[in-house]
C-alpha cells in the first residue's frame, strides 16, 4: 500500500506488538492507507518513539498504549482505553508473540506460561471482546498471527508451534462464526520473515533474503492486510512455504531425531 492509497482513512486499527518487527510494519502499512492507530506494546520507550514517527510520516493519529498482554485484564484495559477516547476499532491485529528454541523439559515454567498467556489467552480474549463489539456494528476485521510452524512439530519449538497451531484453528473457526455478523477474521501463517524474532545472524539473513527463503516484513504485512480486507480466512506467504509445509509433514522420524541431536541437544542453553 503506497502513500497515495487512502482506502482506510477514517478507520481505526488496534495493533499489538506494535513497537517493532512485524507489528510496527503492520502499523506502517495501515497508516500508509490513512488508518488511525492504537499501538500496543510492553516496550514503552520504543512504542512512544514508533507512534511519534508514524504520525509525523503519514499524518495519521497513532496513540501508544503500554500494556503487558500476559496480564489477565489486558483486553479489558485496552477496550477501556479506547472507550474513554470515543474510539471504535474497525481492525484488530493480534500480532504480539514470543519465540524460543528450547526443549520443553528445559524451558522455565515462567516461559511456558508466557507462551500460553500471550499466544492463547490474550489472542482469545482480544478476539472475543473486539469481535463482540464489531458484531454489534455489523462490521470489522480481525487478523490473528499464527505461523507456518503450526504444521511443523519439530524438536525445540514445541511450545511455539503448538500455541501457534491453537491460533490458526481458533481463528479459522471464528472466521465462520462471525462471517454472518459482518466481521471478517483471518489467520496469517507466515514462513520466514526478516525480523530479529528468530535471532538469525545478519549475514545469513541477507543470504536468506537473496534466496527468497525469507520475506521482508513490509511485503508480508502489505499482502496480509490486502487479503484481510478481501475477507480471506487464511494467508500463507509464498509458494516455497506451502511446499515446506508438505515436506515437513512427511518428514521421517529419523530425520527429526537428527535435527534434535545436531541442533537442539548441542546448542541448548540450560536455565
Image (tube, grey):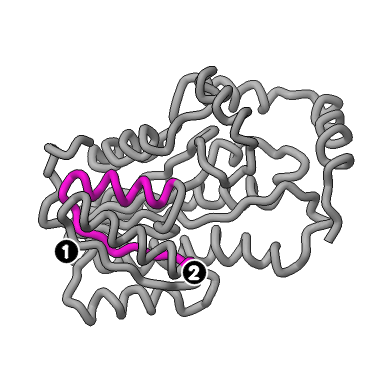
* Residue under the point 55% across and 36% down: 148
Which residue is nearer to you in this view: 172 or 261? Answer: 261
Residue 181 appears in the picture as rendered: no
x and y, in percent, of residue 169 in the image: 51, 47
* Residue under the point 39% across and 61% down: 127
Q: Which residues are magenta?
A: 22-43
Quick one: label 1 or label 2, which is nearer the N terminus? 2
The answer to if 36 sits in the magenta stretch is yes
The answer to if 242 sits in the magenta stretch is no
* Residue under the point 59% across and 55% down: 98
Residue named by callout 1: 137
Task: State how far apart marks 1 and 2 are (Cα).
Answer: 25 Å
Q: Quadrant of the C terminus?
A: bottom right
Q: Quadrant of the N terminus?
A: top left
SS type, badge 2: loop
Residue named by callout 2: 69
* Residue under the point 36% across and 40% down: 221
Q: Which mark is residue 128?
A: none
Which residue is nearer to you in this view: 55 or 140? Answer: 55
Amino acid at each position: 500500500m503506497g502513500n497515495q492509497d487512502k482506502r482506510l482513512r477514517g478507520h481505526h486499527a488496534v495493533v499489538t506488538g506494535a513497537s517493532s518487527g512485524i507489528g510496527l510494519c503492520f502499523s506502517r502499512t495501515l497508516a500508509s492507507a490513512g488508518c488511525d492507530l492504537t499501538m500496543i506494546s510492553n516496550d514503552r520507550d520504543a512504542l512512544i518513539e514508533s507512534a511519534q514517527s508514524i504520525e509525523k510520516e503519514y499524518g495519521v493519529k497513532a496513540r501508544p498504549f503500554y500494556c503487558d498482554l500476559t496480564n489477565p485484564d489486558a483486553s479489558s484495559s485496552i477496550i477501556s482505553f479506547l472507550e474513554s477516547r470515543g474510539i471504535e476499532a474497525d481492525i484488530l491485529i493480534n500480532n504480539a508473540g514470543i519465540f524460543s528454541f528450547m526443549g520443553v523439559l528445559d524451558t522455565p515454567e515462567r516461559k511456558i506460561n508466557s507462551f500460553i498467556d500471550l499466544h492463547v489467552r490474550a489472542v482469545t480474549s482480544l478476539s472475543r471482546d473486539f469481535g463482540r463489539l464489531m458484531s454489534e456494528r455489523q462490521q470489522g476485521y480481525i487478523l490473528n498471527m499464527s505461523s507456518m510452524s503450526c504444521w511443523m512439530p519439530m524438536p525445540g519449538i514445541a511450545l511455539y508451534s503448538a500455541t501457534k497451531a491453537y491460533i490458526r484453528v481458533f481463528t479459522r473457526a471464528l472466521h465462520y462464526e462471525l462471517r454472518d455478523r459482518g466481521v471478517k477474521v483471518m489467520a496469517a501463517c507466515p514462513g520466514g520473515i526478516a525480523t530479529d524474532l528468530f535471532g538469525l545472524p545478519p549475514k545469513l539473513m541477507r543470504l536468506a533474503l537473496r534466496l527468497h527463503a525469507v520475506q521482508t516484513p513490509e511485503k508480508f504485512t502489505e499482502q496480509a492486510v490486502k487479503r484481510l480486507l478481501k475477507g480471506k480466512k487464511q494467508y500463507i506467504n509464498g509458494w516455497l512455504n506451502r511446499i515446506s509445509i508438505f515436506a515437513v509433514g512427511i518428514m521421517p522420524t529419523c530425520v527429526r531425531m537428527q535435527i534434535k541431536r545436531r541442533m537442539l541437544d548441542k546448542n541448548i542453553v540450560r536455565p
